[in-house]
Image (cartoon, rainbow, N blue to C red):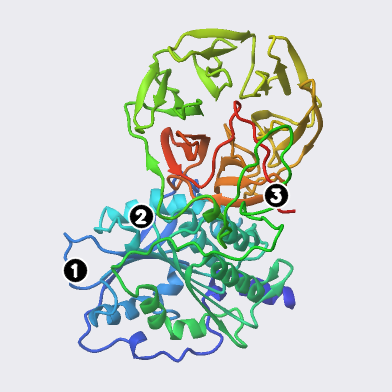
Amino acid sequence: MKKFLLAGALSVAAAVAQPQPANFGPDSLPQPNVAKGTLTKAVLAPGRTYPGVPHDYQVYVPAKVDPAKPLPYMVFLDGNGYAGDGMRVPVVLDNLIAKGELPAMAVIFVNPGNLAPVKPETQLARFSRDWEYDDVRPNFSRFLVDELIPEVAKKVNLSANPDDHAIGGTSTGAVGAFMAAWYRPDVFHRVLYFIGTFVDMRGANQVPFWLRKTEPRPLRIFLQDGTADIDSYAGNWPLQNQSMDAAMNFSGYDHKFALYPGEAHSTRLASEVMPDILRWLWRGYPAPISQNAPVVVPTPPGRGGRGGAGRAGTPAAGLPVAPRGPVYRQPAYNVVTPDKQWEAIAGDYTAAAATAANQAGDVFFVDAKSNRLYKVGTDGKPAVFKQNAGGAKALRGGPDGRLYAIQATGRRIVSWGADGAEKVVASNVDGFDLAITQSGNIYFTDPVHKTVVLIDAKGQRRTVYSGGGIEAPTALALTPDHAFLNVNDAKTREPWSFRVAADGSLEHGAPFFRMETSEQNRLDTAQEIAVDNSGNMYRGTIMGIEMESASGRMDMILNPPKYGSVVSHVAFGGPDRDWLYAVEDGKLYRRQTKRKGAASWEPVKPPQPSL
């Protein structure tokens, strides 16, 4: 019996079912002399995101709109429930738009798709609702942004301003709605969700922690649950939604949480106050919704955490100690500030890739398509440094003032002087990435042979790791004091850490770090690692730009330069090495930070991380 009740509670119908009749107010009832909008049904043909799966949807357009004026819009998942008598969204919109309490807007009511069997009379369809909505990857956001919304825009003039867009969902659909806005805040700035399934169905139980660790995004959120909601093998709905609320409080989001005493997995009370919910969600329109401000929090002595102040340790071997600053509640604000966002580096390049800085702070990057090497000076403008980069796929600034690179086409490591003169350092190299010490030792990863190789300052080469534990050694970086070498494994989510012995050998290696990602995206795709003087490691993932502290924890996630793709390369540059450069979709960006990048020519002992 319990299994039957749980299954029913999680079905599409029960997601918006009303256990008791709702007591609707006048704004949820048809009113005389209020013009009714149109509701048009359509079918979206199968696309790239969900092959073979069509989607039914309806589009609401309010009465008396100017077709030449772009309309704000909302998207509702499990659309039939919101368009019908259960939630009555079209009726509410008719009334509130007529009273001037909401802007005139279009609404897309979309249903989850199903993959039909070959023989429907004897075979069951594959139901896609959980796959689409509970998936915490960006797949559903791609479906909306790349397929559904453009199709609707062929017939309805839709606004392109994210402040004009909202998305909503119920139960599993709540996860789908929130994750769509989470991955694409450049499209959606307003979210409402009811009885959210942020439990361990497909990894949504992780989302509260992502909210805490990630740089705040420009979102306004309404969420609702009942104290008697489901408690199952996957988790406890009320507790998880309270955790979502606590995470939003911690990170300073503009949000409102309605927790109804005694309510089960139901939207009855939420449907009754839908007019007030929509008024709250759209209040102040058209004023923009922006990122929140940093909040300073006191830090107990000796506790750094989040990349902030902490025990600095004792200087050793003449190395200076990297300073640390104040601590902010939102961990990303210990690295960046909301008033200094990403800047695009414009130029005639076509596909930026590997990046590195020299001692002057100039940043170099490879244009993978044109095979050119560019230099970005202090003016922030790229200029061609070398016409033929030899297929360079990894760059590093050396302590001798030269720029080092792995050339894939020639299977060699080379260096260039300030005049562009090229010198061959090593041949027959199947290298992916390289790191250089102050003494001139070069480490490079060899994913073909699953090794890490050392070329010492005398040019002698030897393998320093071939243990087999790293399946695909790729990006690597030294710690600021050159005491440890960190190596990514492209086949896992756990980068390794090795101690660098006095003779340059690697010892006591272990999968020490942890990449934060969804369970469905386990692989490390970072092509390049950046390290700051505090020992924090930065690399791009599907979540953004993650920062792992020297203690091995993933402490925070920076928002990427653009949403919808993954940052591939990162490096610190600029005269003070406080600009973080990032490559995403072949474009180069930079953002000023509160950090200073580590450098091969200037080793520094980092402060002790919070333990």
- Which residue is found at the position 42% from the left and 38% from the top? 589
Image: 353 above or below 193: above
Q: Which residue is mark 3?
A: 609
User: Quick one: label 3, few (<14), some, or many (20+) residues within 10 Å?
Assistant: many
- Which residue is found at the position 42% from the left and 54% from the top? 144
Inter-mark Cα distance, 2 to 3 = 46 Å
- Type of amino acid at the residue the image marks with label 1: Val
Inter-mark Cα distance, 1 to 3 = 58 Å
Q: Secondary structure at mark 3?
A: loop
Which residue is more in the foreground, 295 or 576?
A: 576
> Is disc 2 in contact with disc 3, using a CB cutoff of under 8 Å?
no
- Is 464 placed left or right of 244 in the picture? right
Where is the N terminus found, in terms of image quarters?
Answer: bottom right
- Type of amino acid at the residue the image marks with label 2: Ile
Does the rendering let one see residue 125?
A: no
- Residue 456 at what x, y percent from top left? 71, 15
